[in-house]
Image: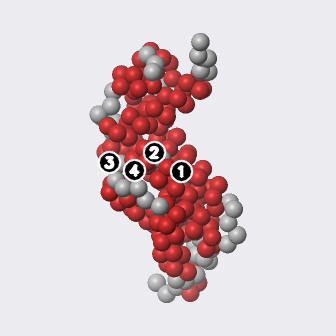
Amino acid sequence: MPQRLTAPARREQILDVALEVFARAGYHGTSMNEVAEAAGVTKPVLYQHFDSKRDLYQALLDEAGHRLLGAITKAVAEAADGKSQTELGFRAYFRWVAEDHDAFLLLFGSGSRRDDEFAGAVRRITAEVAQAIAPLIAVEIDEHRRITLAHALVGLAEGASRQLVERGTDFAPDDIADAVSALAWAGLRAIQPSADRHD
């Protein structure tokens, strides 16, 4: 007789399955019946863990964002200098995209952008990633400018990833990361300290 899952383990299992279902069909194209069926649970069991489809989708966005942030934070912690931090950060991002297509599509696909509440959650996650990498920008500039540049780096990675995912072919994440990080590092090195600017 198979061992019954604990409530936290069941919740994790539902999230894993729901991520795949929502990434494939989008928020509006997915029903709770489909999620329950794919997870091998009844609908009442599904509602024991999530109050509504919206609640489940929000939990998925939070989980995907947590995975992304965790991957980048862990990677850059091992870096010895700004250049290696840039390289390792982009490698972590593109590896996450390559290994977790569904999470990327959920966060950055059009479905999450069309709903104000979900779009707000994605903006918050993007801001958290930018806040995490901002201290790694090793240039003497004011904090607002540093955050803006951090958002620019996140946008650079997202734009490249969107093109790769939409193309639908496998890609070598480290090769892409090395090229994009070289581009980013060259740009970061060219930034003048705040005191030297003549705006």
Q: Residues within 10 Å of mark 3 (few under 14, many from 20)?
A: few
Is residue 175 or residue 16 the one in the foreground?
A: 175
Is residue 93 or residue 69 the one in the foreground?
A: 93
According to the picture, the residue beneath numbered tag 4 turns out to be 108
Image spot of residue 76 (x, y percent)? 64, 61
The kind of secondary structure element at disc 2 is helix
Q: Quadrant of residue 129?
A: bottom right
The disc labelled 3 sits on which kind of residue?
Answer: Ser
Which numbered disc, 1 or 2, marks the residue that appears first in the sequence? 1
Q: Is residue 85 visible?
A: yes
Q: Quadrant of the N terminus?
A: top right
The disc labelled 4 sits on which kind of residue?
Answer: Phe
- Quote the CA–CA distance across marks 1 and 2: 9 Å
- Quote the CA–CA distance across marks 3 and 2: 13 Å
According to the picture, the residue beneath numbered tag 1 turns out to be 68
Q: Is residue 52 above or below residue 72?
A: above
- Quote the CA–CA distance across marks 3 and 1: 18 Å
Contact check, label 3 and label 2, Cβ < 8 Å: no
Q: Is residue 181 above or below residue 10?
A: below
Query: Residue placed at 41% from the left, 26% from the top?
Result: 38
Q: Is residue 52 above or below residue 21?
A: above
Contact check, label 4 and label 3, Cβ < 8 Å: no
Q: Going by the picture, which residue comes out furthest to the top?
A: 1
Image spot of residue 143 (x, y percent)? 58, 68
The kind of secondary structure element at disc 4 is helix
Q: Residues within 10 Å of mark 2 (few under 14, many from 20)?
A: many
Which numbered disc, 3 or 2, marks the residue that appears first in the sequence? 2
Query: Residue placed at 58% from the left, 68% from the top?
Result: 86
Query: Which labelled disc corresponds to residue 110?
Result: 3
The disc labelled 1 sits on which kind of residue?
Answer: Leu
Is residue 108 or residue 168 the one in the foreground?
A: 168
